[in-house]
Image: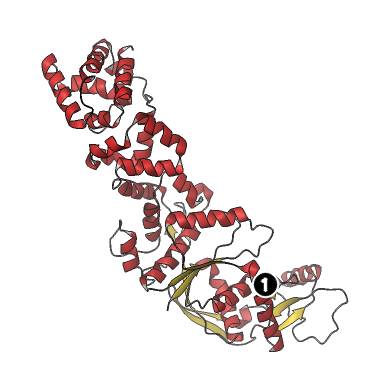
């Protein structure tokens, strides 16, 4: 059975790059009927926080990336890492190193001065010297001195690294906490990972991890390394490009399915398909179509994608979503509008939903963005029209059909043209000159709210 994992470090929020990694691992496992495991790599004790753990869990839950096992925490597995390190010591595949930080710094400075690559010089690898009294030791891995490490990367293809490029990495610190490469290998071994899908910033770690797998007598998983996500300027994605917590996108009104769809297309494709469901992603996802080139983050494309998904929501569904994320805005909206009436209006009339949340906010608290709008359409004639409309509509049943019929009757009875009535009405209700059908918008407003806006506009 295929088993994948997402293993974030809880030193911050779940960012866009991490979310895409999690999505690809999740989709690959789901496609093949496998298991998706969540592991929290919390060995950076200075920077790891419970708040970050919760932010990651909340982000995963919001995106709908459900895991089958876990979350597992590395700091709860320290005995297992020590056991594995002791095994390598017994088998002569690891050794204790007593170098101090000052000695290591001096070693690297001397190497750099000679024009050499700074690296540990293996001085304790085969040493018979008596350890200095009072010094704590780290445990280092005896990396092979000859040969090569080769693997067929599921995204990048065959990769070969010479062992003489690799040093004897520390696998267990003096305090018993594993280093990244060792903890990952022991975890992936114990958790029976079959596929490790991650960013290509880990390519350099892979040969070291393969050698550790071999030293532990274990079969290694298949590796697939995805190219990085770059900003629109070609630089590594950062906050200035919008590389924020996925929960910030939630709070700004983006829908989880829209973000999932966009992330899936960020470095992977299925023909020319742009908008597809989560179920289609699972049915189609493979690693063969993950691009070898870096993906480009495009906030405008994400906004467009979100609009496509918002169009599929009824206003009531959108309001319910706002209630979960932004109770204050929800209170504004329901004070002005009736979610049931909004649903009855019909989704087709609300297809500007691409900017729906902002629109609903403005409809709940209308403010003229252009200072010329109100004088232009609510002049003496316009104010008179909306004053008469307030009286005319007062006895009308507050449904779109009835409102539409009453407006047509009003236009006909006054001998006016439709725009002469509809534009003052639109501006009085929304402070906008362009909206979808104004009878639909009026019907979505609570009747007392709509009539009060008309009376207020009539007063100038």
Lateral position of residue 342 relative to residue 263, left or right = left
Q: In terms of depth relative to the viewer, which is nearer, 30 or 342?
A: 342
Q: In terms of depth relative to the viewer, which is nearer, 442 or 376?
A: 442
Residue 407 image position (x, y, % from top left): 17, 23
Can you say whether 193 is above or below 359 in the image? below
Quadrant where the C terminus is found in the figure? top left
Residue furthest right as drawn: 133
Q: Residues within 10 Å of mark 1 (few under 14, many from 20)?
A: some
Residue 70 image position (x, y, % from top left): 53, 67
Lateral position of residue 337 relative to residue 40, left or right = left
Residue in view at x 47 percent, y 53 percent: 231
**Mark 1 falls on what kind of element?**
helix
| Residue 273 visible somewhere in the drawing | yes
Residue 140 image position (x, y, % from top left): 70, 78
Residue in view at x 35 percent, y 35 percent: 359
Quadrant in the rendering for residue 124: bottom right
Q: Which residue is mark 1?
A: 78
Q: In terms of depth relative to the viewer, which is nearer, 171 or 337?
A: 337
| Residue 15 visible somewhere in the drawing | no
Residue 455 image position (x, y, % from top left): 31, 15
Can you say whether 330 is above or below 19 in the image? above
What colouring does the structure picture have?
secondary structure
């Amino acid at each position: 059975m295929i088993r994948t994992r997402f293993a974030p470090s809880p030193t911050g929020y779940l960012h866009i790059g991490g979310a895409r990694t999690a999505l690809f691992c999740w989709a690959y496992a789901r496609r093949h009927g496998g298991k998706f495991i969540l592991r929290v790599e919390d060995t950076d004790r200075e920077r790891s926080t419970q708040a970050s753990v919760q932010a990651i869990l909340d982000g995963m839950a919001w995106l709908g990336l459900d895991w089958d096992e876990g979350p597992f925490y590395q700091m709860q597995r320290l005995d297992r890492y020590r056991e594995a390190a002791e095994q390598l010591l017994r088998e002569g595949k690891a050794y204790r190193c007593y170098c101090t930080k000052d000695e290591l710094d001096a070693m690297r400075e001397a190497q750099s001065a000679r024009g050499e690559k700074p690296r540990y010089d293996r001085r304790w690898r085969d040493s018979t010297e008596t350890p200095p009294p009072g010094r704590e030791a780290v445990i280092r891995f005896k990396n092979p001195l000859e040969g090569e490490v080769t693997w067929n990367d599921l995204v990048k293809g065959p990769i070969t690294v010479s062992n003489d490029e690799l040093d004897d990495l520390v696998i267990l610190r003096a305090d018993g906490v594993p280093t990244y490469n060792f903890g990952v290998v022991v975890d992936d071994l114990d958790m029976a990972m079959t596929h490790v899908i991650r960013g290509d910033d880990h390519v350099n770690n892979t040969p070291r991890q393969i050698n550790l797998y071999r030293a532990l007598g274990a079969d290694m998983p298949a590796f697939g390394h995805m190219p990085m996500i770059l900003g629109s300027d070609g630089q590594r994605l950062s906050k200035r490009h919008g590389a924020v917590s996925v929960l910030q996108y939630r709070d700004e009104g983006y829908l989880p399915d829209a973000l999932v769809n966009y992330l899936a297309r960020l470095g992977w494709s299925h023909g020319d398909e742009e908008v597809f469901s989560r179920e289609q992603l699972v049915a189609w996802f493979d690693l063969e179509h993950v691009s070898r080139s870096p993906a480009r983050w495009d906030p405008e494309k994400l906004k467009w994608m979100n609009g496509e998904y918002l169009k599929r929501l009824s206003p009531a569904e959108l309001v319910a979503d706002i209630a979960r994320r932004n109770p204050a805005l929800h209170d504004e909206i329901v004070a002005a509008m009736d979610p049931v009436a909004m649903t009855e209006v019909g989704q087709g009339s609300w297809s500007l939903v691409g900017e729906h949340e902002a629109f609903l906010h403005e409809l709940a608290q209308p403010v003229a963005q252009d200072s010329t709008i109100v004088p232009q359409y609510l002049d003496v004639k316009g104010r008179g029209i909306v004053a008469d409309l307030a009286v005319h509509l007062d006895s009308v049943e507050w449904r779109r059909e009835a409102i539409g019929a009453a407006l047509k009757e009003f236009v006909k009875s006054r001998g006016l043209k439709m725009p002469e009535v509809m534009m003052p009405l639109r501006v009085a209700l929304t402070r906008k000159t362009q909206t979808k059908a104004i009878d639909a918008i009026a019907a979505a407003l609570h009747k007392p709210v709509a009539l009060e806006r008309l009376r207020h506009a009539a007063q100038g």
